Image (cartoon, rainbow, N blue to C red):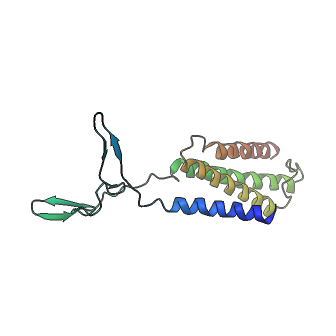
Amino acid sequence: MKSWVASVLFLLAISSSADSWCQENVQARVEFQMEGSGKVEAPIIDFHTGLQPGSSMATGSRATGSAVERVAPPIVAPPRIADRKYFLLNGLQAGMAVFDVEMTQHCIAERKCREANPFMPSSQAGALSVDFALTAYEGLWSYFLKKHHSKIWWISPAAGIAVHAAGVGTGFERY
């Protein structure tokens, strides 16, 4: 790619991200068109507080009689992403991965079987490191999907559990 094209793309990316950073304190002036009359302007209202700028009441305060009482905003806890179901499925997948490697290594040591996956290292440390890396990747992907409210977040750990259960099953078969 030519350097000037890369420079233009870079500047476009920076300008669009800078534009989105500037949207924190948005105020709007709304114009209404009414029948039989001209345009009517509504007052400027801050979208975050719901008050007009320079109004007498501060954010989070309440007028009681002649005094202004300060009120704390309600504390709303965000929903838990990594809940019991998430830890159960991903923990079970990690446990089944370790169990599968141990059963396979035991079977290989007794010369009753061999590793069916050609990409899996033959050593125990290599097999565990590959399984832990794949389990971590699937756990992070599952977390990402669950965080974005996807209903298929459980498929990745469930597939890992099924694959490792098949490996453990063949290990018991040869044991």
Q: Specify whether residue 95 is in view.
A: no
**Relative to 99, 33 lies left or right:** left
Looking at the image, residue 98 lies above or below residue 170 = below
Question: Residue 139 appears at what percent x and percent y?
Answer: 64, 53
Residue located farthest toward the top when viewing the structure as drawn: 35
Question: Residue 147 appears at what percent x and percent y?
Answer: 54, 50
Closest to the observer, 159 or 114: 159
Looking at the image, residue 120 lies above or below residue 31 = below
**Relative to 109, 24 lies left or right:** left
Q: Which residue does the image show at 72% across and 59% down from the upper left?
A: 133
**Relative to 154, 41 lies left or right:** left
**Relative to 11, 77 lies left or right:** left
Question: Residue 32 appears at what percent x and percent y?
Answer: 33, 42
Q: Which residue does the image show at 83% across and 52% down from the upper left?
A: 107
Q: The N terminus lies in which quarter of the figure?
A: bottom right
Question: Residue 16 appears at what percent x and percent y?
Answer: 59, 59
> Hey, which quadrant is residue 71 in on the image?
bottom left
Q: Which residue does the image show at 28% across and 38% down from the upper left?
A: 37
Q: Specify whether residue 154 is in view.
A: yes
- Count of labels shown? 0
